[in-house]
Image (cartoon, helix red, strand yellow):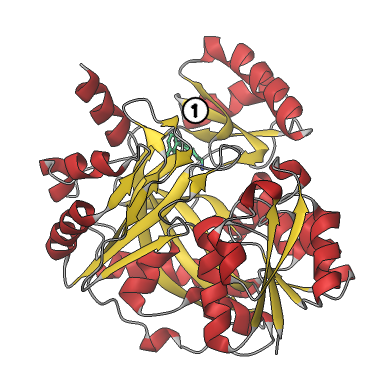
Amino acid sequence: MISKVLIANRGEIALRVIRACRELGIRSVAVHSTADSYAMHVRMADEAVCIGPPPAGRSYLSIPSIVSACSITGADAVHPGYGFLSENAEFAQVLEEHGIKFIGPSSEHIRLMGDKVAAKEYMKRQGVPCVPGSNGPVPSAERAMAVAAKIGYPVIVKAAAGGGGRGMKHVGASEDMEFAFQSARREARAAFGNDEVYIEKFLETPRHIEIQVFGDGCGKAVFLGERDCSLQRRHQKLLEEAPAPGITEEQRAGIGEISANAAASIRYSGAGTIEYLFADGEFNFIEMNTRLQVEHPVTEAIFGVDLVREQILVASGMPMSFKQEDMRIRGHAIEARINAERLPNFDPCPGLVSTYHAPGGLGVRMDSAIYSGYAVPPHYDSLIGKLVVHGLDRQTAIARMRRALGELIVDGLDTTAPLFEQVLQEQDFADGNYDIHWLENWLKKQQA
Ligand code: MV4
């Protein structure tokens, strides 16, 4: 069993991991930059090590500093959280080489899924339904036009090393291909040092639905339903829910089994998310994320499973504590991301939190690392809290979220909380009638 976990992260996710460790009787080590000396994760962990100056590149992203912090404290495992080094295959490999457990999949699996072309080829071979497109990388604009002629315009050119919305070019017609293709290549080379690109049919109004999978590293894997993450702005998710509105039990079981089998076939270890674009009643694979995701609590709520506890168990070489056949969805959960941002433009709004009061009551979970008197530093992500509600059905969950938002107090800076009070009153939201463009269109309407 792992005896001491170093958390290579900050904020609410660091607290999330510390809490799971404490319940398992495992000691925890926080690492922090000099900007985070007064951060809650430093206080809450059993020990803390300062690993560098405020810029993430010199602290939370510094592999040598984190490995040194492990050796100083005797940590035998690292939990990467999300973001930062969580999907860095090099980091996982360096830890493996130092005999430190990386709480997540193997470096090979991270590398495979980080290459979006290789990931898609693997998934296709496993019978996972994929967006129609090129078979593998596309080497020239001429070949790109040939592929597009076959699948039909519009298409999208994506960087193999991209993902999460970085390095994509929409192409409406053949006369735009040459320019779009070359600029996609150039941007991919500049951003990722890898100019490999591939092509897909562009889906106009899909929903973003992702399946939570979990592997034991020994060839067994389960699925824990889906999350609808369509409500986003500029590739930043703002509200997520589980289950996804309107998905039938048959659709869920169908795509869930396919997704779990794909994870099982590579002996995937730990938590993973298989992302799909859902359009015309069909799931189309786009990417797999090899980390615990920000929105994992909505899945935890409806399945009653502690995903971080399971990650730690599996990384310790122990079996998962649940079986697929025992997994039943209970009710509905919604997460609202509370960011320190000023509406309507979502400008980052760091600064002093003069008063903080978390909502509570039945079915309310507030994951946050802020406190009254805490100064949100300007150097990192603007997420300061995740408000997660759970109810017996979707309508109850919506009412509960509105009630909880009314209780939330964050004085001293602006947050995205008021946005949700409005969105939750929309008929389209009540009807589950939204896609990946809905929120951006709605925001434009509000401006006018
Ligand atoms: C697409 C697409 C339409 N068609 N692929 C953006 C994030 C990255 N994970 C994949 N993305 C998209 N891929 C095809 N073939 C539209 C998007 C997309 C998107 C996807 C999910 C959530 C929000 C989005 C916002 C804009 C575009």
Q: Residues within 10 Å of mark 1 (few under 14, many from 20)?
A: many
Q: Position of residue 79 (x, y in %)?
A: 66, 68
Q: Is residue 205 above or below residue 185?
A: below
Residue at the outermost top position: 175
**Which residue does the image show at 73% across and 68% down from the upper left?**
106
Residue 254 visible? The answer is no
Answer above or below: position of 366 versus 143: below
Q: Nearer the viewer, residue 257 or 56?
A: 56
Nearer the observer, 393 or 435: 393
Quarter containing the N terminus? bottom right
- Left or right: residue 144 versus residue 307 is right
The answer to whether the residue bearing label 1 lies less than 8 angstroms from the nearest atom of ligand 1 is yes
Say how many tags the image has. 1
Which residue appears at 72% of the width and 21% of the height? 186
In this image, 127 relative to 182: left or right?
left
Q: Position of residue 10 (x, y in %)?
A: 59, 57
Quarter of the image with the C terminus in it: top left
Residue 135 falls in image quadrant: top right
Inspect this view and state whether residue 426 appears: yes
Along the line of sight, the residue nearer the viewer: 187 or 146:
187
Could you tell me residue 121's position as x and y percent? 64, 52
Q: Which amino acid lies under the numbered mark 1 shown in the image of this protein?
A: Val
Residue 223 x %, y %: 45, 73
Q: Which residue is mark 1?
A: 155
Q: Secondary structure at mark 1?
A: strand
Asked whether, in this view, residue 263 is left or right of residue 115, the answer is left
Q: Indicate the quadrant where residue 352 lies.
A: top left
Q: Residue at left 13%, top 58%?
A: 399
